[in-house]
């Protein structure tokens, strides 16, 4: 995000202040509104499945201050991926711990995809209402908002702890394998950061993000096509 903008400046690429500002505003909106929604989704699904830990700890809320993680927010601003303060989940309260933990984990990325879809529908409606004359600043804001949410959903589905994908993967592992998986999670986390910053996952993540983005945009256009507006 900001890191890429700074790199473009030093590499001689043209810098668009309005576009950069709109992307920063979109990121801040995600930090204060969508990341809390992501964590709320985890807590709400866990609550419905029998775990009231999030509710009793005051985390079943959309209050951004409850979910704000300074480091995760900074990473999202600088690099385009980040995180919020995790909602406490206790799988001992689930009837089927591995399955229900996977469902609870999946709720987070799905909330990002839903937020992205809502943004895409709003943008599509605005585009139709203004007869394609949407100001560039607004375009940049919505594009950043939609793509960052998709990127967060895909990023969180990586099957490495502490990401949501690791808990989803856990539903398919034996108890012994799951124990060893989390026993060495600190080492796995360090390796994951090295892999992420090395760029090794850039291509597969870009492919998955593009596929998810295409689905979101197709779904956003669908209601307008059904009513003959497109």
Image (cartoon, rainbow, N blue to C red):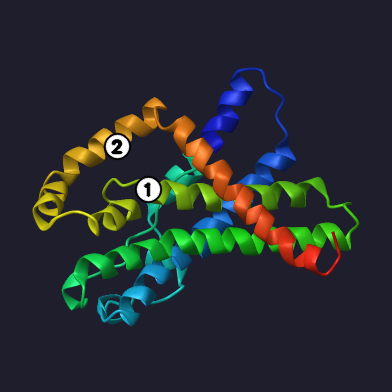
In this view, the residue in front, 82 or 104, is 104
Which residue is the site of mark 1?
Answer: 71
Q: Quadrant of the N terminus?
A: top right
User: Toward the viewer: 195 or 57?
Assistant: 195
Q: Is residue 31 above or below residue 81?
A: below
Crowding near the residue tagged with mark 2, few <14, some 14–19, many ≥20 C-alpha atoms within 10 Å: some
Left or right, residue 54 beside residue 92: right
Give x and y (percent) for residue 2: 55, 37
Q: Is residue 208 visible?
A: yes
Determine crowd level at label 1: few under 14, some 14-19, many 20+ residues with C-alpha closer than 10 A.
few
Percent position (x, y) of residue 99?
26, 67
Q: Quadrant of the C terminus?
A: bottom right
Q: Nearer the viewer, residue 45 or 15?
A: 45
Pointer 2 residue: 192
Q: Residue furthest left?
A: 176
Say what secondary structure mark 2 lies in. helix
Residue 112 at what x, y percent from top left?
51, 59
Relative to 78, 214 lies left or right: right
Q: Is any atom of residue 32 visible in this view?
A: no
Circle 1: element type: helix
Residue shown at 61% from the left, 18% from the top: 11
């Amino acid at each position: 995000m900001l890191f890429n903008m700074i790199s473009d400046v030093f590499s001689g690429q043209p810098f668009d202040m309005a576009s950069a500002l709109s992307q920063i505003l979109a990121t801040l909106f995600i930090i204060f509104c969508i990341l809390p929604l992501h964590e709320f989704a985890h807590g709400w699904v866990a609550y419905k499945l029998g775990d009231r830990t999030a509710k009793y700890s005051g985390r079943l809320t959309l209050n951004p201050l409850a979910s704000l993680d300074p480091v995760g927010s900074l990473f999202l601003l600088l690099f385009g991926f980040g995180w919020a303060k995790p909602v406490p989940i206790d799988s001992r309260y689930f009837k089927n711990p591995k399955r229900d933990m996977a469902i609870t984990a999946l709720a987070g990325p799905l909330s990002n995809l839903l937020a992205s879809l809502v943004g895409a529908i709003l943008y599509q409606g605005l585009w139709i209402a203004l007869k394609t004359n949407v100001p560039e600043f607004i375009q940049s804001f919505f594009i950043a908002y939609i793509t960052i949410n998709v990127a967060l959903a895909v990023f969180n589905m990586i099957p490495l702890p502490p990401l949501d994908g690791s808990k989803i993967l856990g539903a398919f592992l034996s108890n012994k394998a799951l124990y060893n998986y989390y026993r060495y999670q600190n080492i796995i986390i360090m390796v994951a950061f090295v892999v992420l910053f090395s760029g090794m996952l850039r291509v597969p993540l870009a492919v998955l993000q593009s596929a998810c983005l295409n689905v979101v945009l197709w779904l956003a256009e669908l209601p307008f096509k059904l009513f003959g507006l497109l």
